[in-house]
Amino acid sequence: MKRSMFLGSILLVCLAGLATQAFADLTSLRGAAPVAGDEPPPPELQRVINDKENIDRTFKEQPPLVPHDNEKYTISLTDNKCLECHMKQPGKDEAKSVEMGESHFMDRDGNKLDHPSSRRYFCNQCHVPQIDAPPLVGNDFKSVAAK
């Protein structure tokens, strides 16, 4: 009997504490600033540059930029749409796309592979498309190609 009364009193104290927390005037880490409910919509996506030519690199060792939109390309563990055009294939038309570099067919120990290395499989980690937009901040950077 004493044990059930003890547990009941602990439960009552906990419920009282929860009730006071529910009605307490709490402040957050951001202070008294309210959360904005009506935020403006995100800006519209810019038009991706779709060039027939390769885009010049701006610094040494820069991965080549993608001169076309790749938003809808599937890149997963089982499928990589980029490989349809950029994988080395005998008899493939050379003018249509740039083949993957030899570095993509090397493992971490420098051994040549007959397939792209798993470290180079997810193309959009390094290769990105460019959008047709003015620079956000002006600068006087000179690219490697300009020298």
Image (cartoon, rainbow, N blue to C red):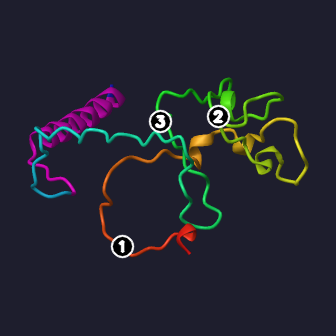
Figure disc tally:
3
Q: CA distance from mark 1 to mark 2?
A: 34 Å
Residue drawn at 50 percent across, 38 percent down:
68
The secondary structure type at the circle numbered 1 is: loop
In the displayed image of the protein, which residue is found farthest to the right? 111
Q: Is residue 135 above or below residue 92?
A: below
**Mark 1 or 2, closer to the camera:** 2
In the rendered structure, the answer to whether residue 133 lies left or right of residue 88 reads left
Q: Tell me the magenta residue range.
A: 2-29
The secondary structure type at the circle numbered 2 is: loop
Identify the amino acid type marked 1: Asn
In the rendered structure, the answer to whether residue 77 lies left or right of residue 112 reads left
User: Decide: marks 2, 3 in contact (CB < 8 A)?
Assistant: no
Q: Which residue is mark 2?
A: 96
Residue drawn at 90 percent across, 46 percent down:
112
Q: Is residue 50 above or below residue 28?
A: above
Mark closer to the chain start, 1 or 2: 2
**Could you say where residue 11 lies in the image, as x and y percent from the top left?**
27, 32
Mark closer to the chain start, 3 or 1: 3
Q: Which residue is mark 1?
A: 139
User: Decide: marks 1, 2 in contact (CB < 8 A)?
Assistant: no
Give yes or no for residue 17 being in the magenta stretch: yes
In the rendered structure, the answer to whether residue 142 lies left or right of residue 10 reads right
Residue drawn at 52 percent across, 43 percent down:
67
User: Decide: marks 3, 1 in contact (CB < 8 A)?
Assistant: no
Residue drawn at 67 percent across, 37 percent down:
95
Q: Which residue is mark 3?
A: 69
Give yes or no for residue 84 being in the magenta stretch: no
The secondary structure type at the circle numbered 3 is: loop
Identify the amino acid type marked 3: Asp
